[in-house]
Amino acid sequence: MAATQALRALTLPSGALRRASRPAVRDALGYFDPHMVVVPGQRDPRAHASAREACPETPVVHPQLGRGGEPVSQYRFRPDTGVREVTDPGETGGEETGGVDILAVQSTDSLARLRRQLETGERRTASGAVTVLVVPDLSVEWDTTTLSTELPGRAELAGLGTALSEPVTVLAGGQQTEYSHEWSLTDDEGQPVSLRMAGLGATGRGGATFAQLTCTPRGTVAAEAVGADRFGLTSLTDVGPATADRLREHGYRTVDELRDAAVSDLAALPGLGRSTAETIHAHAEVIQSGDPLVLTNRAPVKTRNGQPPLCLDIETDGLTPTIIWQFGVYDPVTDRYRAFLQRTDPTDPKPALESFVTWFLAEHADRAVLTWNGEQFDYPCIERFLRQYLPGYLDAWNEVWTYDLYRWAVREGNALLPGRTNKLDHVARALDYDGADTGLTGAQTAAAYQEFMRNPDSEAAEPDWERHKAYCEDDCRALWHVYESIIGARRRDVTDSGSGGARGTQTGLTDFQ
Amino acid sequence: MTDHNNTDTNAMSGDRLVETFPRASLTADSGHVDRLELPAEPAERVPVDTVLGPVLAGSYPHDLFSHQATALDALATGESVAVATSTSSGKTHVYGLQIARQLLDAGVLTADGSRATDRNDAATALCVYPTKALTGDQQEALDELYETLGLDIRVRIYDGDTTGDRREIRENADVVLTNFAGLNVYLEHHDRWSRFYSALDLVAVDESHSYTGIQGMHVAWILRRMKRVADYWGGDPQYVLTSATIGNPGDHSSTLVGEPVTVVDEDGSPRGQRDLVLWNPPPSERHQNETDSTADVPGSSGDLDLTAGRSGPDSGSDPTAGVSGSDDSEAGFVTDRVPASVEAPRVFDHLTAHGVRSLLFCPSRKLTELSVKRAREHHRSNARAYDTASPELAGYNAGLGRQTRHAREQQFKTGALAGLATTSALELGIDIGSLDATVLMGYPGQRQSFWQRIGRAGREGSRSLAVMVADHRTLDQYVVDNPEYLLETDVEDAVVDTSNNSVFATHLLCAADEIAVDETDAGGFAGETRLRAAAQMWREAGFVDGYLEGGVHYCGPGRPQTRVNLYGTNETDYRLQVTDDTDTGRGEPDLDLEPVARNRAYRDYHEGAVRLQNGQQFEVVAVDDDRPQPVVELEPVDRDYYTQTRRTVNVLDATSERQRTVNGFTVHFGHGTVLVHHHSYDQMYVHNSEPKQQAIPTGNPPIPMDTQLCWVEVPDEVETALVRKYQGYGVETGVDPDETDAPHLGYVAGLHAAEHATIQTAPLELRVDKNDLGGLATLVLDTHYTHDGYDELGESVGESMAAATHAIERRAAELSEPPSSGWFVYDGVEGGLGFARAIYEDIESLARRARDQLRDCGCGQPNGCPACTFDENCGNDNQPLLRASAVEVLDQLVGDADRDALAEYLPDDPGGDRRPTVFYA
């Protein structure tokens, strides 16, 4: 399902919104380019107003206000026209081909009313695509003493699921944006009702994040959560809240304004210093231009044979893997992608592992391997599974030169990258990578394989292998794109920063040009 | 650990102590001093070569004690063992030798003790200790053993203090020594430990009796998680648990490790003759000039000591908790003795002045220092009795820096110090050489602890002396009155309960973060139903993804292991912090500022509370609970008072899960909601425990807790007879004269007293901190039950005490049958700790202890005294209480009284008065 057909809903939890500066909110809106904005959390007219002010053209959904005494509001999304508020709820039912309906209730208490409206036909939705239901105060409660959860409004939600013929996706205000669960409920008649639920992030705990939920017409939701501090001035390296305040005091309110400022002017600000001013300025340039900047002379990859690295990505069944079910390798030399998949017996991690490692050692033992965040995940995983299932290959694998571009760029601070998070797809997108749009996320691929593991003999549960292959391939190619962008990137004139050394700069340049 | 140096000892007999002590009133037949002689026990030895192979037998310098041999034989056949023998009986050598044997058998070591390979992929061991100090000590002990044996074995400590190359330890150590708080965290990165776990043959849990109650539950789950990790990498360890004697070594150990365990408790180590003196201090004369008249009334300092009530190494020993009792001096009974904290240092001085190398065990860090001062003052004031200079004494506690502690250990070993006044820090097996006598400042709360402490003296068959200076508290006075209690073979049971769902659920998150949880975990890690329920709950709440068919993976915020709090059970723990601008003057990292659970925070850390922490008074200046992890702010102060809270309690929705009949009484175990309200507090003067200001509101709401309950239902005929028998009682129960007209007063006062006494004597049978228990005596038992016709009250009354009381009253009015009466005992922790269950199972012994205490207390007061019936937290101001009717109820319960004797009080017409809806906590 192409994401161009999908609804992009940006959630700005009222708590996070209140703490964010106006330019930061605008920055976020510019970055996400949503069809609509949802403000979950406490009823907060001020937060609502500031969101509306930041995006006058985009509908801002904050049903907590209960405008005009009506606790339900309705919107409709069509890919060509975006999101429009539905002013006459009774008349929209005819369009079979129409887009996504969005129903927003004031609170969990209003669900009963909405259900009545739908049951009586007082309110209609199109049946072609998913209906998205926004419940700003909904959060799952759990009780560890009884090992049970309570879903507030459970019966009404089940009734809504029955009243609507199309799939329903509930956006729960009080759940984390990473939340995704398929609830199996029972309606008044005892019929099973299945509801997909995702979170809008107004959890009241943890850090403040903004997130874009991409809702496909089939009802799947993928979230891109970005810390609220990644927008506006604080998105820049070395700029915390205090520095941001100081910059604002001196008239620098946006990243753009900082880029346009002279480094010497910034360096003259109290408490900033030359080096920080340079970094801030450089990072502003990186964000605005979308071009990375290399800060040091260290190379991200060294090779044994002069050939570029192979780009590797693995897919597992979760964060504590019981299987690596796909090894994807992109070879930039041949421009070919090779996948090793475990398509039968999902409980046996050995065959795919063995195919991959024997192929690799036979064909490419002298090639360097590149991953994104592989030091934290891919490499220890592979080592763990080799140790468990094919210990004979462990030593040979450990001789392979492996690199982690994320570690080099972000953790070791060798480069400034555009993009608001350090996730590979976000970085690649900021670097204009034009990827295949599989509509999948890592969590979804893992969940798909989990489903296969639960029902290995069910055709319905068998993953769409080509789609998952395409997803993994896309990550490998995205990694190569980021690597190439870095290799071809500008490098900071280290002599000027005072932090490197003139000599080092000269020798280092040859690695890159 | 075994000390084989037979140094000359200067033992003093109990008789000689009494003869020589400089006090005219103290004579050989003084009623305040009781002497017991415990005969010597010879060693039972087994030739070492019948147990160990030639390499070890050839280099081990002694024969083995019989229990060491039994344990090593059991280990050789693949069994896990629990070694429960006396202090310094060579328990460390059991696992020390087993480790050596495994390394030799696995070929890591050659017959000459050198390493066959540098790498050890074949046999590793994990040893877990309750304290870091003990870890250090045991590393030395193991190193020393292996040096003696000529074996090149790498014994390494890996804990929060480990600096340097941690990776080197993970990859090369043969034996890793750590603690459970550390292990809990290290399990997350088990990949890094793959070598270690793949070769793991042995897990040693040292001083395993420490793990009771809350800590026991956590340790049981940490060990289960450890076993999953070991299993994942191919390790399949045996277990050695070592413990001082506990009442239930088999049950406790096998619950802790989740596997069958063979108990080895036939102690083969020798013991010299031991004189035991139970020393009750003389009555204090109110205006008599104490040797240290400026000092606190020490009994109260323990009430305030944070460490005293905590489970853990210090735990269970809460020697000065309780009421120091000086309010009702009109009675003929001695209510005001010289406190143990004043008397014990005198004995300590006397012994050390006679060249008797001694340890004085004190209940708090502050008292270790104070005791040294008091001992010197005693020496000075009795200069004529001693022809020597004041002996060299020093304090010892975990609040001292590591170097200071080490220096004092050495000075004591070499004889430069004649005595150490110590906290429980020296109770566990830290090597300080041999000594002749121990003095206990107060009963340490547990027989297990008592024997462990006095066992420090008189190693290797030499004669020794132990003096227990009693305090004026329930347990102390019970022990002094019933010295045979100490000599009974059974000591307290340690309680480990893995049924607490909250604790289980937290550890399940950790497990799912370490290795995906799947169907193979059903049965081994937890029962399938429970596992599925918890996985579903966390999945619906968004903390895990996946199913047991396949794998459940943790997907919540990073490091779920940090949710585990070894000292509490739920997530909303209160962090204690000293206000920023103050300096406590001690850079001690293990200052016991562990987070506390909410019920504890409400009781002990409300605003205005004054608590003693490591000898420093702190006042709670702010409580911020409007945040994910609430914070209690403490400020150092110098007040002339301490505080104690009062609570009211209600029990709602009690559901019986098991019941049994005991002499016509029905005893239940089940669960329910307990509503506890720490509503107000009193300020009490430190110097005399008199109230300074009373009933100051805490401002805290009541706390509802779903927990485990045990309750006793009194049979109708017993109730009816006793109500009539005691209907004349009024002011005797302690109530005001205008409240004496209720006909049930005398009876319900007995239930109330029986409830207090049951809880106060529980530590005689169980390793429980009595603060983890609570109770309620009621005339309307049935109204506290769940009932088909009613909604669960716990839901509807929410957090209102008044609403709960009102609901109970309404139910009482609606009852068609007259309700029964009885009393509840509950676990004061959300989800329960297993104590109520243990009490259910052994109500007979507990009731007997409670009865003895009520009957035998010398206070002569109908309503009792702090030593038998009073509870300092009683929300009803210790009213009404009546010993006589309590004794009679308990006599009936345990079957020591004739039921027919009650017949004369039974009415002809069994109707009876409509009872009032009363209950007392």
Image (cartoon, coloured by chain):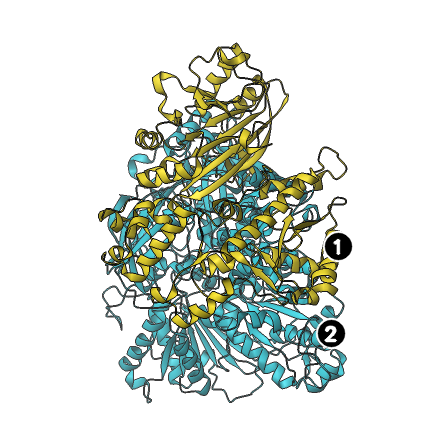
In this view, B316 is above or below A116: below
Quote the CA–CA distance across marks 1 and 2: 34 Å
Q: Secondary structure at mark 2?
A: loop
- Residue B449 left/right relative to A354: left
* Residue at (36% x, 67% y) in the render: A495
Q: In the rendered image, which residue does mark 1 sit on?
A: A355
Residue occupying the point 74% across, 70% down: B76
Viewer-proximal residue, A410 or B283?
A410
Q: Quadrant of residue B542?
A: top right
User: Which chain wears cyan?
Assistant: B
Determine whether the residue tagged by mark 1 lies in a helix, strand or loop: helix
Looking at the image, can residue A319 be seen? no
Quarter assignment of residue B882: top left
Residue A284 lies, in percent from the top left, at 36, 50
Q: Amino acid at mark 1?
A: Ser
Q: Which residue is mark 2?
A: B106
